[in-house]
Image (cartoon, grey):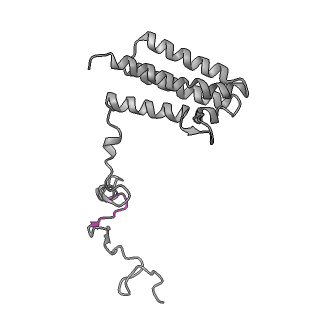
């Protein structure tokens, strides 16, 4: 009876435990065992190959989880505020709007989502050291934006014009500029 296993050589029997070498893309041999190369269930050589492979080359995963500097956090807050409030322009006009106005078109749920994102911006400001009077004013802006935004059409127009997130980031920047480094 001929051997039906396409991966075995003609001289080996089907039940043989001998297998061909598995070579990674860089020409290194990968030792395959039933539970990994060291018997622990984790194949470190395969993981190293994955880390060095084409999927993640040039990207340092550890850098993604490092703490951000003050300037990086402020830049992130500024970018999110711009996305929420002034990312787009109504064609033929100078009226700017952001995804806050778009998501707010979904009744109740949209306003809850955008208010939650705005509250996260306030939390980040507090993490940057903003005092209670600054965060209280920021929370006031978020509350006005959230409550008025619940009104079906007029609330969405108010969201476009009020721009609570841009106000909050501007307020935070002014406070940070007055602080010693």
State which quarter of the image contains the C terminus: top left
Comparing 36 with 84, the one in front is 84
Q: Residue furthest top?
A: 133
Q: Up-down: is 85 above or below 22?
A: above
Comparing 101 with 135, the one in front is 101
In the rendered image, residue 77, in percent from the top left (x then y), is placed at 44, 30
Residue 179 falls in image quadrant: top left
In the rendered image, residue 176, in percent from the top left (x then y), is placed at 35, 19
Q: Residue at x 52, y 36 (%)?
A: 83
Whether residue 119 is visible to the viewer of this picture, yes or no, is yes
* In-image side of 173 versus 60 (left or right): right
In the rendered image, residue 21, in percent from the top left (x then y), is placed at 31, 73
Q: Which residues are magenta?
A: 29-36
* In-image side of 48 versus 2 (left or right): left
Q: Is residue 123 magenta?
A: no
Q: Residue at x 30, y 55 (%)?
A: 44
Q: Residue at x 31, y 42 (%)?
A: 63
Q: Is residue 34 magenta?
A: yes
Whether residue 129 is visible to the viewer of this picture, yes or no, is no
Name the main secondary structure of what is drawn in magenta. Answer: loop
């Amino acid at each position: 009876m001929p051997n039906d296993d396409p991966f075995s050589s003609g001289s080996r029997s089907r039940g043989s435990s001998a297998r061909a070498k598995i070579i990674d893309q860089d020409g290194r041999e990968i030792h395959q065992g039933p539970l990994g190369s060291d018997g622990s269930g984790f194949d470190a050589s395969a993981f190293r190959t994955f880390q060095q492979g084409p999927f993640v080359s040039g990207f340092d995963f550890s850098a993604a989880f490092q703490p951000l500097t003050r300037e990086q956090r402020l830049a992130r807050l500024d970018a999110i505020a711009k996305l929420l409030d002034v990312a787009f322009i109504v064609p033929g006009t100078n009226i700017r709007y952001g995804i806050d106005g778009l998501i707010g078109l979904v009744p109740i749920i949209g306003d809850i989502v955008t208010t939650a994102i705005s509250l996260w911006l306030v939390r980040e400001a507090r993490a940057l050291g903003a005092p209670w009077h600054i965060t209280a004013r920021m929370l006031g802006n978020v509350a006005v934006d959230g409550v008025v935004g619940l009104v079906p059409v007029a609330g969405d127009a108010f969201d476009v014009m009020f721009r609570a997130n841009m106000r909050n980031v501007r307020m935070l920047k002014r406070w940070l500029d007055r602080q010693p480094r």
